[in-house]
Image: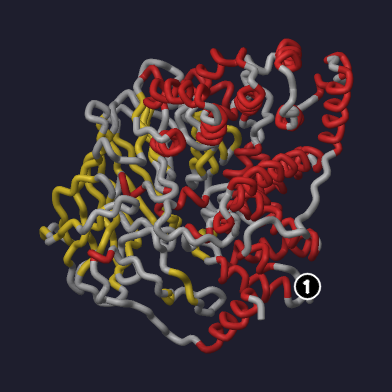
Amino acid sequence: MKLYTIIIIALSLLLFSCSDVVSTDESISVEQNLNTDSLAIENKEIQNMELIDERDDHTLSNYDEVSSRHLHLDIEVKFDTKTIVGSVTHTIENLTGSDHVIFDTKALNISKVELNDGKEAQFKMGEVDELLGTPLVVSIDENTTKVTIYYETTEKTEALDWLIPSQTAGKEQPFMYTQGQSIFTRSWIPLQGTVALRITYSAKVKVPKNLMAVMSASNPVHKNDEGIYEFNMPQPIPCYLLALAVGDLEFAPIDQRTGVYTEPSMLASCVYELGDMGTMVNEAEKLYGAYQWERFDVIVLPPSFPFGGMENPRLTFATPTIIAGDRSLVSLIAHELAHSWSGNLVTNSSWNDFWLNEGFTVYFERRIMEAIYGKDYTDMLALLGYQDLLETLETATPDMQRLKLQLKSQHPDDGMTDIAYEKGYFFLRLLEEQVGRDNFDAFLMEYFDSHKFQTITTEKFLVYLNEKLIVPRNIDLNIEEWVYEPGLPENCPKVVSKNFNAVDANMVQFYETNDISKLIDTDKWSTHEWLHFIRNLKAETTVEQMTMLDDAFHFTQSGNSEIAAIWFQRSINIGYDKIDKELKAFLMKIGRRKFLMPLYTALAATPEGKEKAIAIFKEARPNYHYVSYNSINQLLGVNF
């Protein structure tokens, strides 16, 4: 009997046989870091049914015994010392009568802990775990409902990026932002750092008077004279979505519920580039139901931001590399918007189930883009994604090629690859093709609505999928292979792009004639067509041919970061060194890991290139966030 069938049968039986079951083990000690292989039974209702969920391996907290339900921050952001100082008050629920509550911390100084009305509490710091941090154990009693922790961040805090004025667009004021995903929030707030728990929060944040603070919550639209800002997030969110940015910011609306924050010198260009945001929200609602977060705003950050975007609710954090001047890279905004349903509204219960976050979001993103820009446009996005997936499959170990991962003792970031994004997307696209788009849309709308503000595991999703979609339509699919086995199944949907077919025809002409003039209609090509062209340059392309292309299309000087990055990568591979000056400038300025890792990897492929990479990295390192420079340290075998 197949594993998938066994899972479905076993969990289906649980739906009817489980009563109020609670699995706890109060003998687990802090020294054991509360990491076990046992399964915890969550007392959560999914359509009035109880299912077994895995305990999150990436927390040292006892969230399944005592749970934080709401936290309030009272903090000051101090640029002179590059620290955040203040307190966090947790409103807790003691589920098991425990005499202690455990919070996750990493590289934080804890000065004092108080209970309820200010009574000082006994607390101790547990054994340090290099990956997960240090557990903070606080003694409580049956009457404890609030725990206030006084703390200060340190220079080792991984979530914070402190920028000096020269690293910003305006060059006059400093900037600071947080990055919580995956497990970095515990390094700037003591909390229960698990995706399995959703919390509401509020905050009072003091910043220098000439700067503005914004969070993943209700936000101001103007600076105030006091430099004190208050925030509220009434919808429960996983803690990795707690986010804060402080800088010389201005706001401009796009429509009645969307808008842009950024530095003043960038505001006009960002407003133009993101002008379709309101339309995106409207189209998303048509597909999968009402937007649940009131506002959808975007903050465009300085270039050191390590990701394309981060879907912090109400306020997506975005890289300036999407500001291309022609709205050609705004699929990233559609992606972050889609997270308002998949990831933010329905959250993976552990990082092993990360594909439930990103696979769904890529599928949703491309549906939004198709609704606005048409199928031909989306086919190009899907085919580029397929190319990324094949490249990842060539290098990923078999255990990292599965949708359902086993990341215990590994950093969750190790699982944030194109497997989750693109293999997840193609699995969902297969389901759409098997049941029909209308049926699949109805299924997804019901899924998001019935599971909103909850967490879910892969197994729980498969039970729901089986009950709602597979069995009623008597469909026979190799779901076990897709979810639990490495590689890409043979029934992966095929993507055909007529736009890319035209690009391929042009490429054939170029190589056959060695004549740039044989390339036709290139003035009409989008960013995606150029990406396809450059990606598919042959390994045996000569330096003379690269020079010919560069002279004609000015790739080395491109202001489009996507085009520049792939051109630099192929140039390194082929040995075209006329990019060296611009390549260094790019690596010095851009902190987006998606661009940095392929470029440093390409350089490190030869001894001479690795020497060049280390020299550039040593100089560029202060411009990168921890997420980026830590990955490059590992790649190059250095520790700057």
Q: Is residue 277 left or right of residue 512?
A: left
Q: Is residue 346 visible?
A: yes
- Is residue 579 positioned above or below 183 on the image? above
Name, please, the residue furthest toward the bottom: 17
Name, please, the residue furthest toward the top: 551
- Is residue 97 positioned above or below 533 on the image? below
Q: x, y percentage for residue 491? A: 78, 60
Quarter of the view holding residue 196: bottom left
Q: x, y percentage for residue 475? A: 78, 72
Quarter of the view holding residue 533: top right
Q: Which residue is mark 1?
A: 475
Query: Which residue type does callout 1 highlight?
Result: Ile
Q: Residues within 10 Å of mark 1 (few under 14, many from 20)?
A: few
Q: x, y percentage for residue 201? A: 36, 52
Which residue is at the front of the view, 300 or 107? 107
- Is residue 413 positioned above or below 13 on the image? above
Q: x, y percentage for residue 207? A: 29, 32
**Residue at image x 14%, y 51%?**
112
Q: Is residue 250 visible?
A: no
- Is residue 285 positioned above or below 315 on the image? below
In the rendered image, the quadrant that contains the N terminus is: bottom right
Q: Secondary structure at mark 1?
A: loop
**Residue at image x 57%, y 82%?**
10
Identify the image's colour scheme: rainbow, by chain, secondary structure or one colour: secondary structure
**Residue at image x 39%, y 50%?**
183
